[in-house]
Image (cartoon, helix red, strand yellow):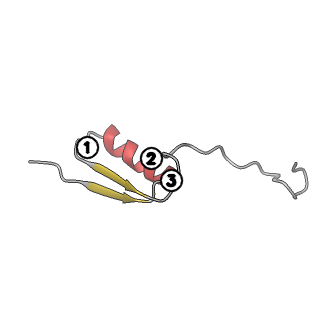
Amino acid sequence: MKAGAIVIVGAGQAGGWAAATLRGRGYAGRIVLLGDEPHAPYERPPLEQGGAGRPGGA
């Protein structure tokens, strides 16, 4: 059986994780990420509790 293509709409962090999970679970078909992000998916650092303009923030 030939694997088909999977299209993931949204090439942000969640889309990148979806593609990585598919590959990690053995999916060998074509994976297409659709999005208008200027960079490849990457893991963004978590936001701090006290952001700019908030008590305790920078």
Q: CA distance from mark 2 to mark 3?
A: 9 Å
Judge depth for marks 1 and 3 and give the one in front.
Answer: 3
Q: Position of residue 27 (x, y in %)?
A: 25, 43
Q: Residue at x 46, y 54 (%)?
A: 11
Please provide percent x and percent y for residue 19: 37, 47
Could you tell me which residue is drawn at 25 percent across and 48 percent down?
A: 30
Amino acid type indicated by mark 2 = Trp
The structure residue drawn at horizontal position 52% and vertical position 47%, both measured from the top left corner, is: 39
Mark-to-mark CA distance, 1 and 3? 20 Å
Q: Earlier along the polypeptide chain: callout 2 or callout 3?
A: 3
> In the displayed image of the protein, which residue is found farthest to the right?
55
Q: In terms of sequence position, does the residue under pointer 2 or pointer 1 come before the other?
A: 2
With respect to residue 7, does 23 lie above or below? above
Q: Is residue 51 left or right of residue 34?
A: right
Judged left or right of residue 18, residue 53 is: right
Residue situated in front as seen by the camera: 36 or 26: 36
Q: Is residue 23 above or below residue 9?
A: above
Q: Which mark is residue 17?
A: 2
Where disc 2 sits, the SS reads helix
Q: Which residue is mark 3?
A: 12
- Secondary structure beneath label 3: loop
